[in-house]
Image (cartoon, rainbow, N blue to C red):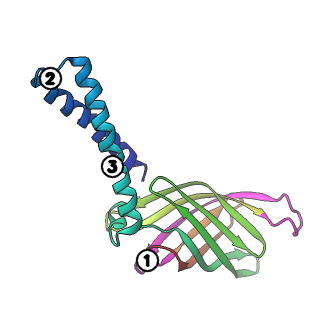
Amino acid sequence: MQHLIKVNLIVYAAAIAAGMASLLLLGADPTAAFATATKVASVIQLISLAFIYFAWRFIPGYSFFIFPNLGGEWTGHVVFTTANGEREIKADLHIDQNVATISLVLTTEMAESETMVVYPRKLSNFRHELLYVYETHKKETLPPPSYRYRGTAIIRLAQGNNKLAGSYYTEQGGTGTVTFTRKRGKS
């Protein structure tokens, strides 16, 4: 979604260039033309940023062209492999998102995972996924309380952006899957 900010800067530069060219053709002083073009381009940039933000947040379907709004509460489970087989635990996921950033916090009875890096990606088949690097730490009430590890996950969106499912890998060699369903939030 950072590409929106970059596109907006291109629009800003193009507006300055077009404004200056127009004013210079009308015989304006180059310094005055630059000052006027910069002011007009600033207004155009603010309007386009506001439009992108409000359209992404409030116009149904618009977010599909950028990246769906996943913000809100999700509930689901984490399945991980142990020496004795697979184990499933309940998990809650909180996602904060705007047009520039995404942050995930996954909470289970034993631990909490926070975002280190997340990259939203639109696939060639028009599906969306998150490439996610996280750090997990055990809850303070569980021994050892300072135990931390990092991991990566690939999480895909499904069912009209109301389901997240994927797989993960930890730096200790642990693997598993995650599945979440939206509790509330914008789609």
Location of residue 92 in the rendering, given as x and y in whole percent from the top left corner: 65, 75
Splitting the image into 4 quarters, where does residue 37 fall? top left
User: Which residue is depicted at the point 78% across and 72% down?
Assistant: 110
Could you tell which of marks 1 and 3 lies nearer the N-terminus? 3
Location of residue 147 in the rendering, given as x and y in whole percent from the top left corner: 82, 59
Find disc 2 in the rendering and name its residue. Answer: 24
Location of residue 36 in the rendering, given as x and y in whole percent from the top left corner: 26, 29
- Check residue 166 for magenta coloring: no
Could you tell which of marks 1 and 2 lies nearer the N-terminus? 2
Location of residue 172 in the rendering, given as x and y in whole percent from the top left corner: 72, 60
Residue 16 vs 55, above or below: the answer is: above
Q: Nearer the viewer, residue 123 or 99?
A: 99
Cα distance between the residues tagged 1 and 3: 32 Å
Find disc 1 in the rendering and name its residue. Answer: 158
Splitting the image into 4 quarters, where does residue 170 fall? bottom right
**What is the magenta range?**
138-164
